[in-house]
């Protein structure tokens, strides 16, 4: 190959645009534990999901705080376990984000206020196929499992009894890659040692 040909090839490579890889679909998840529940005293009943205990007055106040925090978030859906306490935590948020604006759609086949999931691992697979913004309501022993099943890092240590104010944001940063931020605190803050205090969540828009 002559020097002139080599120069022409080099020039052609220099001006030929490299095809960009398509961006992964944008996904943002807001992950919380259910709000405060009525405690019965029997752990087997207390943790039951058929339908399980309801929220306390403080729990309903936290559910309202969650609705207000996400009122401008333009969510595409709300995921919940089949427990009464998780459903009660998220139903107001779901009602605010139906396709008819701030009221649920009349056609229930088009709009399901809450999508029920069985396990955090199965939900992680489902969410990986979606794009958009979603609220996920779980339990003290499922938030970390879901975040880690997505490949992100769970921060803040184990969730303890009465700690219902954490919110995590998990964002897709690439194909099959996620990053978690938080936790922040919403509603009435849980009383923590000063070394473990959380920042208050900013309204999500």
Image (spheres, rainbow, N blue to C red):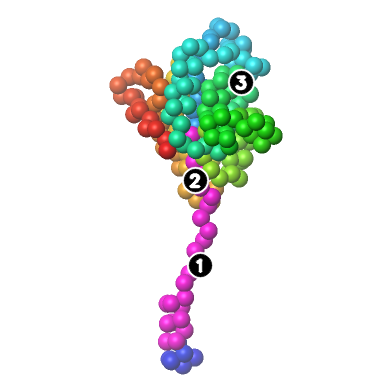
Residue depicted at 33% across the width and 24% down the height? 197
Label 1: state its secondary structure.
loop
Residue 19: give its label.
1
One can see residue 23 in this view: yes
Let me know if residue 40 is in the magenta part: no
Q: Are marks 1 and 3 in contact (CB under 8 Å)?
A: no
Mark-to-mark CA distance, 1 and 2 = 22 Å
> Which residues are drawn in magenta?
7-30
- In depth, the one of 63 and 162 nearer the eye is 63
- Is residue 20 rendered to the left or right of residue 197? right
3 or 2: tag closer to the N-terminus: 3
Residue depicted at 53% across the width and 31% down the height? 102
- How packed is label 3: few (under 14 Cα within 10 Å), some, or many (20 or more)? many
- In depth, the one of 180 and 95 nearer the eye is 95
Residue 172: give its label.
2
Total marks drawn? 3
Residue 143 at x, y percent in the picture: 51, 29
Query: Residue 182's quadrant in the figure?
Result: top left
Label 2: state its secondary structure.
strand
Location of mark 3 (residue) = 83
């Amino acid at each position: 190959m002559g020097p002139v040909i080599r120069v022409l090839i080099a020039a052609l490579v220099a001006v030929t645009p490299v095809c960009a890889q398509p961006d992964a679909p944008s996904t943002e998840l807001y992950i919380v534990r259910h709000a405060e529940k009525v405690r019965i005293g029997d752990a087997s009943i207390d943790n039951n999901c058929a339908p399980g205990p309801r929220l306390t007055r403080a729990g309903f106040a936290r559910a309202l705080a969650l609705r207000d925090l996400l009122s401008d978030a333009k969510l595409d859906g709300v995921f919940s376990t089949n427990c009464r306490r998780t459903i009660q935590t998220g139903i107001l948020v779901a009602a605010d984000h139906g396709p008819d604006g701030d009221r649920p759609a009349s056609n229930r086949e088009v709009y399901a206020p809450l999508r029920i999931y069985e396990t955090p691992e199965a939900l992680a697979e489902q969410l990986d196929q979606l794009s958009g913004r979603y609220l996920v309501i779980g339990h003290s022993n499922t938030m970390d499992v879901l975040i880690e099943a997505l490949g992100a890092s769970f921060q803040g240590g184990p969730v303890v009894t009465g700690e219902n104010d954490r919110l995590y944001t998990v964002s897709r940063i690439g194909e099959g890659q996620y990053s978690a931020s938080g936790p922040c605190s919403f509603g009435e803050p849980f009383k923590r040692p000063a070394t473990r205090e959380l920042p208050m969540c900013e309204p999500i828009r």
